Amino acid sequence: MNKCFSDSPTVTATPVVYRDDDVVLDGVVMRDPATAEPRPGVLVVHGGAGLDDHARGRARRFAELGYVVLAADMYGRGVRGDRQRIMEQLAAFRADPGLLARRTRAALDVLATTPGVEGPLAAVGYCFGGMSVLELARAGSSVAGVISVHGSLLSNRPAPPGTVRTKILVCHGGSDPHIPWADVDGFAEEMTAAQADWQLTVYGGALHGFTHDGDTGQTPGVAYSETADARSWTAIRSFLTEIFDGEGAPVAGGISRCGSFDAG
């Protein structure tokens, strides 16, 4: 199976402990030590299961590109692996987008002060993590860009006009039964009204969780798509090049629906 990346043994993974108020969080910093010069930082936010092998694997991919990466812990100790506590935490985040944005900012603060990080930052989220980074954007974060991959798109606190300061890329499965088309249309309308710089790429036939290459197919509506995974990875790399270097290539793959606001 084509993974679109090499399993580089040079990437190091260093545990990092940080806090959001009284919640102790256990993240992982990944980097390629062969890259000596300071680099932009990429925050990776996990899906609903917590900081698992999928999130770590995605973080490794970004480190292999030369970025300094923090794989965040959004739940804190004692939650991952406990379904009841996970569901309670997810419900709390959905009810309070401000709490979700604050928890994500706590990880960004750690990334910004990590040795070797210099310049702009980006935040990438998968499933629940996609919702997390979009709430970060709605909260007015000055991070250079956020990327949501098969994440929830609507919020009970839509962004007011002029508040979204970061560029946004959304990678969405065209056959995702967990995110109805009304939510997709609602997100497009919200971001347009907010005067945001946003992109939405839809991958035909892809279900929810299309980047989870370890998925066993047991969850209805969730399945890995090698094609959508590869195309979204191309889009993500192009987006990071654009926001970090200002030399973005065209986003590849799927049916794209894009919008932007030019204040000039």
Image: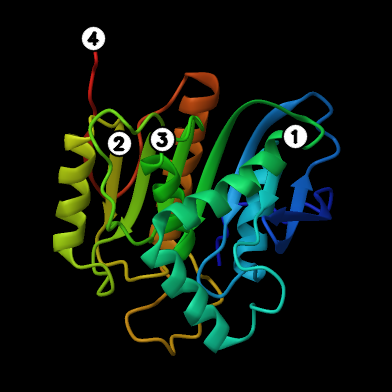
Q: Which of the two labelled residues, at mark 4 and mark 2, occupies the earlier sequence position?
A: 2
The amino acid pointed to by label 1 is Thr
Q: Earlier in the sequence, mark 2 or mark 3?
A: 3
Of labels 4 and 2, the one closer to you: 4
Instruction: For marks 4 and 2, give the CA distance.
Output: 17 Å
Q: What residue type is labelled 2?
A: Trp
> Which residue position is annotated with label 2?
198
Residue linked to disc 3: 140
Disc number lying in front (2 or 3): 3
Q: What residue type is labelled 4?
A: Gly
Q: What element carries label 4?
A: loop
Q: Circle 4 is placed at which residue position?
A: 264
At horizontal 41% and vertical 32% (from top left) the residue drawn is 166
The residue lying at 23 percent from left, 9 percent from top is 264
Q: What element carries label 3?
A: loop
The numbered mark at residue 113 is: 1
**Label 2 to label 3: alpha-carbon separation:** 14 Å
Q: Distance between the residues labelled 3 and 1?
A: 20 Å
Q: Residue at x 80, y 41 (%)?
A: 32
Residue neighbourhood size for the residue with mark 3, other residues' Cα within 10 Å, grouped as few (<14), some (14–19), many (≥20): some
Q: Please rate how many residues cluster around mark 2, counting C-alpha atoms within 10 Å: few if below 14, some from 14 to 19, many from 20.
A: many
Which colour assignment does the render follow?
rainbow
State the residue in front, 16 or 203: 16
Residue contact between numbered discs 1 and 4, judged by CB atoms under 8 Å: no
